[in-house]
Every structure is written in C-alpha cells, then in structure tokens.
C-alpha cells in the first residue's frame, strides 16, 4: 500500500495570507502546506481522503489520475470545499463517485453541494457523487476499511484505517473503543496542530502521547500551523514520530 500526503496544513494553509513570520517566509519546502488530505493506493484501487480547496493543484502536482472513492473525515470547509473538482475523476470513471463518511458529513454535503447528488447525463460537466453513511468496518471495492470515531471539539469526525495505516486528522480525543481499533499499526497519520494546546485539535505533545500509547511503527503529525517549523520541531520529537510534509510518500506493508 502507498500513502501520499497531498496536503498537511491547517485550514489557513502555510504560508498564511498577510503573515511574515519565519515559517511563512521560510525557504524550506516542508514548511509550505496545503490543506490536509491523503491519497491511498492499495490492491489496484485508489482512495482520496477529503477534498480540500487545493484538490486540483494537489492532484496535478502528485499525478493523481484516478480516484475510485472518497473517504470524508468531516464537513469543515478545508476538508470538503474542493468537491467540485471531483468532476474530473467522474470523467475518468464514466459515472458517479462513491463517497463515505458519517451522517453529519452527509447532511452538510447534501445541503451545500446538492447539485453533486442530483447528477447529470453529461458525466464530467459537474461532480456526480453518491454517499454512504458508515459506522462499522466494511469492504470498499474489495479493500477492508474501518471508520474510526474521533472527537473534534463539539463534533464527531471520522478517521480511517486501511490495512496497517490509519489517518486521523482533526481530533482532540480518541474514545477507548476507537483506540482498540488502532492496535498494530505500521503507519499512523495524526493531528498535531501546534506546540501549544488547542480546544479542537491535539497539540504536538498530546499527539506524541497518543503515539506512545498506540506504538505504531511510524507516526507522522499533520494539520500543521505556521507555528510549526519543520527543522526546529522535528529535532525534539521521539525517533518514531515525525512531521508530515506535502507530497510525502509512505510505503506500508500489506496486512
């Protein structure tokens, strides 16, 4: 399985508009972050996790040419507002694109992107999606997928486990029943917003504590703000924990 981190930034992205801080003006490409999303390739299938506002640019930059399904973490703008760009993948597939997530996400998408559910006989003219609400393990195009319930402030977000990899962004709490589904990971991609606490996201120290509890082979922290300088923060992390960066590719052994 191959996991490509298309974006690793917070809702503002990095650089932040009108900011001249050291990270926003850095020449280190690992400090340049589009909004957080991932692309997973496994057993000849490819899954997109979230549709960020930069989806078109992310897909072009990383040569994403086909998407068989979309897994949504939650309904916030930085994770869904690129939905219109799915029309290009509709054209490749020749039909609607199946999407998955929780009930709250479905309700929000149906209100904000009603045209994508209505469809059109002209495939590729507009996005055309279906949406299945999932709250238990299921098989997606022959690949076992496990939705992971997460606390994200006052709402419930969804993390995703595919084989030995789990993608858990936008969370500040993992219930015990979800922790039980995250044992034996090779790769954990985990929300680690910034060094200091935040009411709806794990801070970097909190994320490190989660990694120590789950003990995956490798942990990468994502959804990073401009408070996070790649070189400076990386130097203080445990050996098995690192900062994610846009375009990072991780090969995960088949489970």
Image (cartoon, helix red, strand yellow):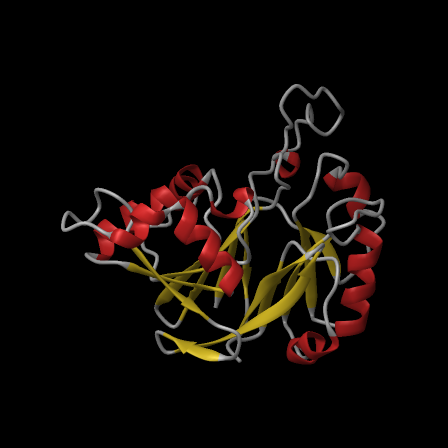
Between 247 and 177, the residue placed more toward the observer is 177
Residue 176 percent coordinates (x, y): 74, 77
Q: Is residue 244 left or right of residue 22?
A: left
Question: How many dots with numbers?
Answer: 0
Residue 160 percent coordinates (x, y): 55, 67
The residue shown at (46%, 57%) is 107
Query: In this rendering, does residue 74 appear at all?
Result: yes
Between 51 and 142, the residue placed more toward the observer is 51
Relative to 84, residue 72 above or below: below
Residue 66 percent coordinates (x, y): 32, 55
The residue shown at (80%, 44%) is 233
Query: Extreme left residue here?
Result: 121
The residue shown at (77%, 36%) is 227
Q: Is residue 18 left or right of residue 140?
A: right
The residue shown at (55%, 69%) is 252
Query: In this rendering, does residue 49 appear at all?
Result: no
Residue 43 percent coordinates (x, y): 38, 72
Tell me where residue 41 sits by quadrant: bottom left
């Amino acid at each position: 399985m191959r996991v490509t981190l298309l974006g690793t930034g917070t809702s503002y992205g990095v650089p932040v508009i009108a900011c001249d801080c050291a990270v926003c003006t850095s020449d280190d490409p690992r400090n340049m972050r589009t909004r957080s999303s991932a692309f997973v390739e496994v057993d000849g299938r490819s899954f997109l996790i979230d549709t960020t506002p930069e989806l078109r640019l992310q897909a072009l930059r990383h040569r994403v040419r086909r998407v068989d399904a979309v897994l949504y973490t939650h309904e916030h703008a930085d994770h869904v507002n690129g939905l219109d760009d799915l029309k290009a993948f509709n054209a490749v597939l020749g039909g609607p694109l199946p999407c998955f997530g929780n009930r709250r996400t479905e309700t929000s998408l149906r209100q904000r992107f009603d045209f994508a559910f209505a469809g059109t006989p002209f495939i590729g003219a507009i996005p055309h999606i279906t949406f299945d609400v999932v709250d238990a393990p299921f098989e997606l195009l022959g690949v076992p997928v496990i939705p992971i319930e997460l606390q994200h402030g006052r709402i419930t977000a969804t993390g995703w486990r595919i084989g030995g990899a789990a993608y858990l962004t936008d969370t500040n709490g993992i219930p015990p029943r979800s922790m039980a589904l995250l044992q034996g990971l090779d790769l954990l991609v985990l929300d680690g917003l910034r060094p200091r606490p935040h009411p709806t996201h794990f801070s970097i120290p909190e994320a490190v504590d989660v990694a120590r509890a789950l003990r995956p082979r490798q942990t990468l922290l994502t959804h990073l703000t401009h408070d996070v300088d790649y070189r400076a923060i990386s130097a203080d992390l445990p050996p098995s924990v690192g900062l994610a960066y846009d375009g990072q590719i991780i090969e995960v052994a088949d489970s």
